[in-house]
Image (spheres, helix red, strand yellow):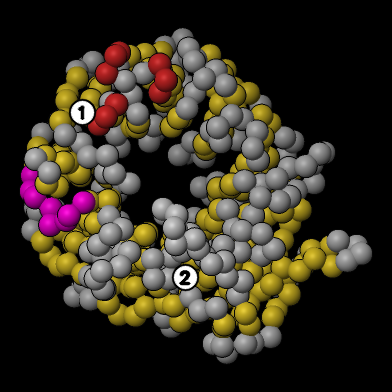
Amino acid sequence: MNFSEVFKQSNQLCKVSPDGKYLATCVQYRLVVRDFNSLQIVHLYTCLDPVMHMEWSSDSLFILCAMYKRGLVQVWSLEQPDWHCKIDEGSIGLVSSRWSPDGRHILNTTEFNLRVTVWSLCTKAVSYIKYPKACQKGVDFTADGRYMALAERRECKDYISVFVCDDWHLLRHFESETQDLAGLEWSPNCCVLAVWDNCLEYKILLYSLDGRLLSSYSAYEWSLGIKSVAWSPSSQFLAVGSYDEKVRILNHITWKKITEFEHPATIINTKAVVFKEVEKRPTCLVSDEITQLPAQVPVIKPDPDRANPKIGISALAFSADNRFLATKNDNMPQSLWVWDMQRLSLLAVLEQTAPVRCFVWDPRRPRLALCTGNTKVYLWSPAGCVSVNVPVEGSFQVQSLFWHCSGSSLVLLSKEHICLLYGLFSQPGRAAS
C-alpha cells in the first residue's frame, strides 16, 4: 500500500470523475482538477464565491459548482476550458443543485422549496416543476437515467410525480399513502419505487412505475419508525432500519419480511467473529484482536428529552455482490455490524475505540473500508481485518473516505486535506496492526 502527498480541500468537496480519470477538489473559490494517477493539475478554475457543492456530469465532461449563498451555479468544461456557464437564480435563492442523468441538464431547487428549475445546457431552455417537498430524499432517478421521481406537497397531502428525463414531460402523478413523506428511492432494476413515512410512523410503500401500489409494510405502531432504507444491488432485498435497533429485510416477490437483524448488547452467536480494536501500552500500538464470545458491545444511553435521539439504525449498505450487509446502530456508535445475506445471520462485528464516522464498500470486491476520525483506515473482508496508519507529516485525522471506481484506491479526507491510498488490489489479511 502506498500513500500520496497531501492536498488541500474545503467543505469535504472532493470527487473522482465517473470514468475514474480525474480527481476534482474545491479550495474556497478554486476548483482544481487533477489526473488521478499522476495527481498533476490539468485544469484550474476560479469561481465567483466559495463553493458549497460540486458534482461531475455522468460523462465526466463537465463539473457543476454551486454557491448557495449567492444563488449561483457555475459549470466548467474539461474539453473546452475557455467555455463556462453561469446560472443565477436571483432573489428566489438556491438550496440545492444537481445534474440530470444525461449530464446536459441541471436541476436547481429554490429557497423554501418553491420550485425546481430545469436548465438545459444545450438549448438554454428552462422548465419549472412546482411544489417539490422539502424532505430527507425527495428526488431520485432510475439507474438507467430514463425517469425521475419527485415528492410533492400540495394542500397538506403528499404526492409523487414521475417525469420522463428526455423532455421532462409528466408521465404519472399520484397521491402517496403517507402522512408525511420522508424519502423515496428507485430499485436498481428501475421497476419499483420505495416510499417511506417520517420517523413518527413506521410505513414503507412500494409503487410500480405507473403509480400502482404494489405493497405496504408496517412493523409496528405508536413508536418512532423508519430511520434508514437501502436496496440490494440485485433489487432482491430491501433493508429497512428503524429506531427499535432492528433491520428488517423485505423480499422482492411478496414484499413481506423474511428476517430481521437485531443488534444486542451481548453477542452470543457462535458463528459471528468480533474484532476489537485495542490500544497496547506502553507502545501505544493499536491492533485488532478477535474477542471470545459472549462479547459485550459498548452501548450509549440516549437522552430521551432531546430531539432526534441517538438510537436506531442510521446507516445501511450492501456489498456490490449482494453477499453482505453492513449496519450501524447509533447507540452503539463504536461498532459496525456485518451480516451474511446468504445465511441471513450475523457474520462479524468491528468494535473500534472511537465512533465510526464513515464506512463504504469496495465497488468491485466484498471489502469494507471505514474510519473513526483518527489517523487510521480500517479494512474488513471475509478473510479478516486490518488497520493502516496514514503516514503523513503532522496529524491526518480521517473524517470520511470513498473508493475509486476500480476498487484499487481510497480517497481519504481530513477536515481540510485529502490523501490517496493506492495499491488495494489484495484482500486484507487477518488481524494485523
Q: Quadrant of the C terminus?
A: bottom right
For the residue labelled by badge 2, is the local secondary structure a helix, a strand or a loop? strand
Considering every residue shown, the one lying at the far top of the view is: 82
In this picture, residue 178 sits left or right of residue 276: left
Point out residue 168 in the picture as x, y percentages from the top left corner.
15, 32
Observer-nearest residue: 296 or 13?
296
Q: Mark 2 sits on what residue?
A: 324
Q: Is residue 175 highlighted in magenta? A: yes
Of residues 408 and 395, the one drawn nearer to the viewer in this rendering:
395
Q: Which residue is drawn at 33% across and 64% down?
A: 224
How far separated are the C-alphas under marks 1 and 2?
Answer: 39 Å
Tell me which label, 1 or 2, sits earlier in the chain: 1
Q: Is residue 257 left or right of residue 428?
A: left
Above or below: residue 344 compared with residue 140: below
Q: Position of residue 412 (x, y in %)?
A: 63, 44
Range covered by the magenta-colored residues: 172-180
The answer to which quarter of the image holds residue 89 is top left
The amino acid marked with disc number 1 is Arg
Q: Write down the quadrant of residue 236 in the picture.
A: bottom left
Name the residue that disc number 1 marks.
Answer: 115
Quadrant of the rendered structure where residue 275 is?
A: bottom right
The image position of residue 123, as x and y in percent, is 22, 17
For this orientation, the residue located farthest to the right is 282
Is 247 inside the magenta-drawn segment?
no
* Residue at left offset 69%, top offset 85%: 292
Query: Crowding at label 1, few (<14), some or many (≥20) Cα neighbours within 10 Å?
Result: some
